[in-house]
């Protein structure tokens, strides 16, 4: 009997109860306090670039700029940009008004190079939206008439929130902002930067090439004023 009792006691020493077994298990990692578990954390959603709505500007300042177009908020202006780009309208057009303050932007899109021109297509109604005029924003220039956007546009060097809901933002620079920063300043610049070639990415553009340009069409002697981000007509 003593032998049996001793064996029973020995067996009890090596018998693990369910509670003890739970404590013996390797601890699992727990989320930090205030942080959701991995299963509960929202996953980042990556939106693939849409070639049909990617505007490419090869600049004489030295490189290629890509711009994400926003047809969801400015469908008419985006369609105009694509139509004119595919017709070759923007090729060799200069940046005719480039200033650091207060507007802090580079304006282009006038084949005359004066700020008073545009395309032969009708002006567009305003498509003012909630996209802000921050660094890299691309917006439609116009006259004092809100419904006068046509072919001209401007790219913001920095924020100018006073423009919000007064001009139509239709895109944002995604790569190549360093080449925008190098656009020659002036109203007009002495040696204006030009758009060597404009493309829509869906059209499979060639690699960047800064080909020689014809002489830029700048303001004639005595002509000093161009449009505000788009507004004031040239002085006579």
Image (tube, rainbow, N blue to C red):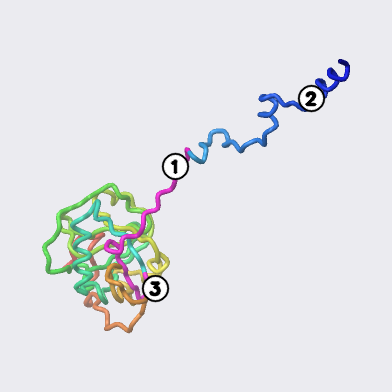
The Cα–Cα distance between marks 3 and 1, rounded to whole angstroms, is: 37 Å
| 47, 113: nearer the viewer | 47
The Cα–Cα distance between marks 2 and 3, rounded to whole angstroms, is: 80 Å
Report which quarter residue 107 is drawn in: bottom left
**Which residue shows up at 32% across the image and 66% down it?**
98
N-terminal-most mark, 3 or 1? 1
Look at the numbered disc 1 and give the secondary structure of its residue: loop
Q: Which quadrant of the figure contains the N terminus?
A: top right
54 drawn magenta? yes
Neighbor class of circle 3 (other Cα within 10 Å; few <14, some 14-19, many 20+) is some
Q: Which quadrant of the figure contains the C terminus?
A: bottom left
Residue 121 in sight here: yes
Report which quarter residue 192 is drawn in: bottom left
Residue 104 in sight here: no
Q: Give the answer, above or below, for where 160 lies relative to 94.
A: above
Q: Give the answer, above or below, for where 75 lies relative to 5.
A: below
| Outermost right residue | 2
| 140, 117: nearer the viewer | 140
Q: Which residues are magenta?
A: 40-64
Viewer-nearest of discs 3 and 1: 1
Viewer-nearest of discs 2 and 3: 2
N-terminal-most mark, 2 or 3? 2
In the rendered image, which residue does mark 3 sit on? Answer: 63
Residue 74 position in % (x across, y down)? 22, 54
In the rendered image, which residue does mark 2 sit on? Answer: 11
54 with respect to 234 (left or right):
right
Residue 72 position in % (x across, y down)? 25, 52
N-terminal-most mark, 1 or 2? 2
In the rendered image, which residue does mark 1 sit on? Answer: 42
| 166, 7: nearer the viewer | 7
**Which residue shows up at 84% across the image and 19% down it?**
4
């Amino acid at each position: 009997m003593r032998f049996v009792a001793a064996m029973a006691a020995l067996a009890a020493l090596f018998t693990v109860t369910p509670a003890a077994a739970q404590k013996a298990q390797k601890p699992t990692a727990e989320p930090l306090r205030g942080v959701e578990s991995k299963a509960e954390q929202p996953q980042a959603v990556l939106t693939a670039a849409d070639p049909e709505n990617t505007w490419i500007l090869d600049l004489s300042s030295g490189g290629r700029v890509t711009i994400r177009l926003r047809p969801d908020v400015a469908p008419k202006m985006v369609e105009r940009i694509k139509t004119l780009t595919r017709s070759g309208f923007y090729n060799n057009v200069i940046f005719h008004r480039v200033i650091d303050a207060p507007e802090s932007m580079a304006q282009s899109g006038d084949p005359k190079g004066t700020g008073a021109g545009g395309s032969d297509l009708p002006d567009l109604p305003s498509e003012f939206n909630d996209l802000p005029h921050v660094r890299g924003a691309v917006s439609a220039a116009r006259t004092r008439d809100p419904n006068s956007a046509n072919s001209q546009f401007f790219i913001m060097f920095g924020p100018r929130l006073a423009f919000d809901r007064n001009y139509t933002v239709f895109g944002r620079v995604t790569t190549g902002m360093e080449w925008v920063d190098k656009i020659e300043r002036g109203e007009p610049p002495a040696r204006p930067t030009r758009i060597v070639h404009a493309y829509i990415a869906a059209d499979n553009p060639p690699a960047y090439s800064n080909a020689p340009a014809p002489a830029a069409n700048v303001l004639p002697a005595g002509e000093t004023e161009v449009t505000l981000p788009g507004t004031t007509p040239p002085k006579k």
